[in-house]
Structure formats: structure tokens, C-alpha cells
Image: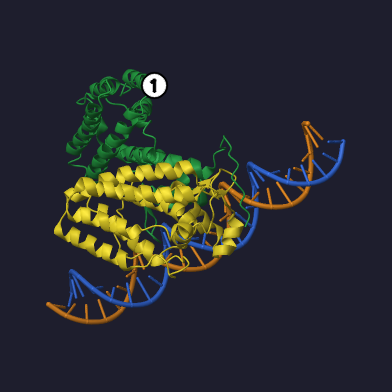
Chain colours: A yellow, B green, C orange, D blue
Amino acid sequence: MSTDLPIPKADQPATLATTIYARLKADILTTRLEPGRKLQSRFLMEQYNVGQTPLREALNRLTTEEFVVGMEQRGFYVKEVSREELQELTKTKCWVEGLALRESMQNATQAWEESLLVAHHRLDRTPRSLKADTFEDNPDWEKVHRAFHATLIGLCGSRPLLGFCEQLADRLYRYRMMSIAKAYPARKVGAEHRDILQAVLAKDIEEAVRRLQQHYQRTADVIYSDLDGVIG
Amino acid sequence: MSTDLPIPKADQPATLATTIYARLKADILTTRLEPGRKLQSRFLMEQYNVGQTPLREALNRLTTEEFVVGMEQRGFYVKEVSREELQELTKTKCWVEGLALRESMQNATQAWEESLLVAHHRLDRTPRSLKADTFEDNPDWEKVHRAFHATLIGLCGSRPLLGFCEQLADRLYRYRMMSIAKAYPARKVGAEHRDILQAVLAKDIEEAVRRLQQHYQRTADVIYSDLDGVIG
DNA sequence: TAAAGAAGAAATTTATAAATTATCGGCTGA
DNA sequence: TCAGCCGATAATTTATAAATTTCTTCTTTA
């Protein structure tokens, strides 16, 4: 049996399957492909201009991530949303990121604190909405928001845990998108991020964890009350 | 846009892609397909007697679970093993299952304690090896072992967390398989499980968590010292 | 109401295209 | 002259597309 080792290579020319995977994932998370929708191959093929093979491979990848549910012999569906899942995801995120932030802060370095400060500054000066009066999602905001939260827990020392946190963030993102337009004016999310940053820089672990968890819980509460009509 | 809801159905006729997925996963976790090995489609097609499409779909699923690494345009490889990963996986498992056990014990019910007792009893009377003198893996043992640990954290109230723990168990299983034949005679793992059970039934949360974490750490230590020659 | 058949969709096989790796021969420089 | 390197071409392998089979579901008729 030959045991060829994979030669590490930096760049990745990106295969069609990977491209369509990313596009499908984005469309599911933003709910452009709404929860519960049937994903028929014919429809997707003309919608995204790809053949069945790369499409099918993308769907299979999304299946193990549970963004897509595959019913054997009966096609694929966008994963449903539910109150219970929102609740469980939020609870889990509070637990796991609380843990990760504790570890991260124990490993704190000056360089880390500085990059956290920078990440917060970028978040602070990126507007949530492209327009002042009506809400229009600013795609940059989610990027810098993600970056800030990722930096917070980035020093926890466990790549598997970081991966899990990212997956939780992805799953929760879909719920956030479902209520953001309505919740936008009410929420003062900037202050919460600032409070978290301050506690971290003050090296007050317990307070930082408490504020981070409160931040996630508040987000869920807003969505929760907002989703009364949408989810059964 | 039509929004057909997926009709929930109990049985699953099992598609070829799903079957080959399960077989590949099992062969990777047991290291019958050794770490780093290149997974050429032709070889796998005749080895498992399937066409490329279901094979490719299975590989794509395994890719998102990180049991297989897909190099764009350059084929698939079995994920490598490393000391660092073993260490991170163990650390993460101690953290996360510690958390889950705490929650589970706070939700303890009589029925749960009873099923835990049963799970332990089954584990206790299932031999680790099929032969007394030389080690020969008893496939039933891993099943009851998994069941015991799954029961321990089963009441934590978070399906995402349980899924993550299962994934960690899968990833660590491969490392256990790499050293089990050598480690078998030395380890007194039965006592550790009994001690955990006792602490749980005594409702001593801190002690139970400590013993569970120690159990995982010891397992890792044995593998670690055993793998000196195998991993670079 | 149940059974049979037709239509539609999904899963798999077979075939084609594109990309990568390996091989060979010639060239350059010591 | 010989060792090492570069480039072109052949061979292998992966990625995608087209076609076929199999399964499901809807409809119609007895």
C-alpha cells in the first residue's frame, strides 16, 4: 500500500463544487433560500448555472453541516428553523464561548490585546446599515463583527473549539437575518461590544464572560420576540 | 416561490452514497485507511464496488467533517494525525464534556440515573478483547463504551453540544486505535468508569467532572507515550 | 377504495473535458 | 564528459457533463 503524503500547497484554484458550495451556503444563511424550501436539482442548476455533479457535491457537504437536510431518495431541503433550536444554539454559544474567552484571557498577550482593540475600532466605525432611515444590510459589518468575536476567543488554544464556535455563529446568523430589519432601530449593540472590550482590557475575566454571554442572550431575546409570527 | 415542507418519514432506504460514506468513515477511524493515504477514485471504486458519483459524494461529506482533506484539483487524502491535534482534541474534550456533565447532572432524574447504571453494567460485562492473552478488538465494546459516555452527558439539554462531543469522540477514536494493541494489558479502564459512575450517583458534581476529565487525560497520556515512533 | 400505470425526480452509471504529474530528451555549465 | 536543470509531451487522475436507471408520487380506473 503506497502512502503518498499530501504535498502542502498554498493557493487553491477553486473547483466548481467549492464555488457553488460557498454560494449555496451564503444564500441559505441569508435566507435568500428560505428555511424548509425544497432544493430541486433542476431549479438550482439553472439558478446557479452549474451541472448536477458539482451541485450534488455541494449539497452533500452542506448536509454534514446540517444547513441542508437530505432525505434519502427524496431530495434535499433547506434546514428548518425553530424556537427550540434558537434557544439551544444560544445556550450552547454562551457556554462554549464563555469557556473559550476564559482560556483566551488566561493566555492574553500584549499583541492580542492590541489586535482586539483594532478589531473593535473597525467594528465601531463600520455602519450597520447602508442607509440611515431604513435598514439596508451592510455586508462589511458582519465581516468585522465576526472578526471581533473571533479575536476575543482566538487565544483559547483549541482549533476544534474555534471551529465549533464558527459553526454556531453560522447557524445563528440565519436567525439574526430573519429579524434584523425590524430589530435594527431598537438595538444598541455598539455599547455592548464596547463594554466587553473594556472588561477584557481590564483583565476582569468573570465580568468579560458575563458581558459576552449577556450580549448573546440579548440578541436571542430580540429575535425571539420578533419571530412570533414567523415561526409556528 | 414554492415552499414545500419536507414530509417527515421514519425509515430510510439508504442510498449508495450514504452506505459508502459510512464504510469509508469506519475504515478511516479504524485506520484501515491509514492517515495521510491518498484516496484515488479508481482504487476506491474497485475496493468498495461503487461508481465515482456516490464515492465522490461520500468523500465530500467526509471533507466537511475533516476526516478527509480535499486538495482542489489534486484529489483527496486521509487526514493526517499529529501530537498537537491529539493534545488539542483531548483538552477540548475535557473542557466541553466537563461542561456537559455539569449541566446533565443538574438536570438529573431518577430515570436517567437508572439508565446510566444499566449502561455501565453493559460496559462492565463486555470484554475489551475477544481473546484473553493477545488483544483482538471486540467491536461490541466500543458501542457500549460510547453509550455509557453518551448517557453521562445526555441530559445537558443541547443537541449541538452533544453532536460536537460525538465528533470529538470520533476523531479521538482513531488515535486510540493506533495504540490500543500495545496499551491493552496495562490499562485498568474499568475502575475509572466505575469511579465516575459512583461520583455521579452520589451527586458530587465537582468530583464526577474531575474523574471524567482525568479519565480522558489518562487515555491521551497512554496514547501519547505509545506513539513516539509512529508520529514524527 | 385499492391497484396499476404514467410522469416526474433523484440516484447512479458511463462518457468527456480539464488539469496535474511523470517521463524523456536536449541543453548548459563545471 | 558528466551531472543537473529546463521544457515539451505523454500518461494519469481529477472534475464535470450527459445519459440511464431506479425510485417516488400522482393520477386514473376498476
Q: Is residue B101 above or below residue A141?
A: above
Q: Which residue lies most toward the front here?
A: A186
Place of residue B25 in the rendered image (x, y in percent of width and height, measured from the top left): 40, 41
Seen at 18% across and 42% down, the residue is B229
User: Please, which chain is the residue tagged with disc 1 on?
Assistant: B
Number of on-image labels:
1
Front residue of this view, candidates D23 and C2: C2
Q: Is residue B144 above or below residue A164?
A: above
Q: Is residue D28 left or right of residue B30?
A: right
Place of residue A186 in the rendered image (x, y in percent of width and height, measured from the top left): 42, 58
Place of residue A94 in the rendered image (x, y in percent of width and height, measured from the top left): 33, 45
Q: Is residue B209 left or right of residue A171?
A: left
Type of the residue with mark 1: Ser
The residue wearing badge 1 is B115
Seen at 36% across and 22% down, the residue is B116
Seen at 31% across and 44% down, the residue is A96
Quarter residue B152 falls in: top left
Mark 1 residue crowding within 10 angstroms, few (<14) / some (14–19) / many (20+): some
Residue B154 visible in the picture:
yes
Q: Is residue B71 left or right of residue D24?
A: left
Front residue of this view, candidates D19 and C2: C2
Quarter residue A111 falls in: bottom left
- Label 1: state its secondary structure: helix
Quarter residue B224 falls in: top left
Place of residue A166 in the rendered image (x, y in percent of width and height, measured from the top left): 35, 52
Q: Is residue A123 left or right of residue B215?
A: right
Q: Is residue B2 above or below residue B105?
A: below
Front residue of this view, candidates A135 and A80: A135
Residue B81 visible in the picture:
no
Which quarter of the figure is the C terminus of chain A placed in? top right
